[in-house]
Amino acid sequence: MKLKFGRCTRRSTCLATFVTYVAMLPLANLVAQQTDQWTKARRELVELIAEGVKDPRVLQAVAATERHLFVPIDQQQNAYFDMSLPIGGGVTISPPYVVAFMTEQLDPRPTDRVLEIGTGSGYQAAILSPLVSEVYTIEIIEDLGNEAAERLKRLGYENVHVRVGDGFQGWPEHAPFDKIIVTCSPENIPQPLIDQLKEGGKMLIPLGSRYQQSLCLVTKENGKLERRVLESTFFVPMTGRAEEVRNAKVDDGVPVLANGSFELLKEESVPANWYYLRQAQIVSDRESPDGAMYLKLVNATHGRVAQVLQAVGLDGRRFKDLEVSVTARASDIVLPEDDSFSGIDIRFYDEQRRQVGAAKFGPWLGKTSWAEYSTRFAVPQEARLLMISVGLYGATGELDIDNIRMSAKKNGPKGPFD
């Protein structure tokens, strides 16, 4: 099964913006209009994620869950975009599509008792609540966990039980669990979670390094784990013991882009190391500019997205410039609206996962032959992470990409490119 991820690029289609005259309306009318806007935004979000998530129970849970109440006030205007959002403490709330997809893969049943390892919002637990018997959620950030507990109680999620602590340890006094879902990433499956999973039970967990992970569906049979990799992905690393015992000690401050020539495949037509795929596939062609394969992105509908994405560590205290090179080819690419784009989009984030800068490389338009392009961006000093995405954002046509390269220039008068 191919996992497709995406983000809505038309804010006006996700959430209408109030104009200034609403301040003059009676308070009751204003509240009613705002409620209508949230409802409309959730309905449109469900239409978006229904392209890949088919379980009607899961879609109904997404439609009924007020995601804007699970994010900080300054992020509420972004709540129904299919994107992750910072919630404080260096962690994020997962994109709605990711939450819905993971919930569907877990195959929740009305009799299930589910353990959820969260990062602090309570949103995943809220989605699970109407689908299962009991949800036991461990939030790993203390202040966020306390806020999530109060929020879930206030909103009436009576079958959700919240604990603040190290998700590595699980919740032994309520074990065993029929299902376990983990929304932060350890390097390997923590043993307490294995012990607390019921025989025949399922666990959904992202595993891997800090920036290269695989979403795995694990089934416990005869005391042993059977693992199936669903897709490459990116989640916030787990805190506590699971993070301390990582074997891979990498220098996350040096930007290293993986599989930039798309020669490595996760499965047929799906590139390794890249995730949040949408209308994207690998093409094998002996005339490929670099190696035997390249990435093809195709979009025929104005406003839709075709993309791939990857997270890369980058320490802005050590590097002042980022150079990005790529070989690209365009075919009938049209930008139908002012905020459409075709090319490379880079976002810089600080330690708290707050965006501290952005840059674009493109757009590529019309019809072109294969050609190499290069540019350089200034790196914000606060940056600790960058997200690089390549695609058609609302633009129509075909964009072929190969041989993406990245290098950073050290701070200092004559620092070489690494």
Image: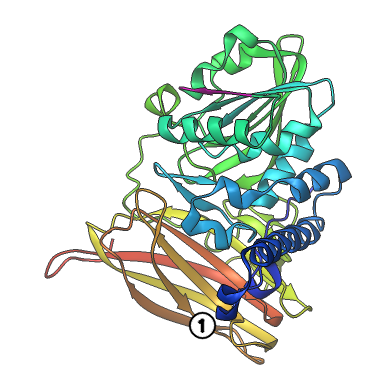
Examine the residues drawn in magenta and state their main secondary structure.
Answer: strand
The relative height of residue 321 versus residue 71 in the rendered view (above or below) is below
Q: Residue at x 17, y 65 (%)?
A: 415
Q: Is residue 282 visible?
A: no
The relative height of residue 242 versus residue 206 in the rendered view (above or below) is above
Q: Compare residues 202 and 61 and report the one nearer the observer.
A: 61
Q: Position of residue 216 (x, y in %)?
A: 67, 34
Q: Residue at x 11, y 70 (%)?
A: 413
The relative height of residue 275 versus residue 347 in the rendered view (above or below) is above
The relative height of residue 247 versus residue 224 in the rendered view (above or below) is below
Q: Is residue 39 visible?
A: yes
| Span highlighted in magenta in the image | 161-165
Task: Indicate whether residue 152 is drawn in magenta.
Answer: no
User: What is the image's colouring?
Assistant: rainbow
Q: Label 1 belongs to which residue?
A: 362
Q: Position of residue 109 (x, y in %)?
A: 84, 27
Q: Residue at x 59, y 87 (%)?
A: 338
Q: Residues within 10 Å of mark 1 (few under 14, many from 20)?
A: few
Q: Position of residue 149 (x, y in %)?
A: 55, 30
Q: Compare residues 307 and 286 and report the one nearer the observer.
A: 307
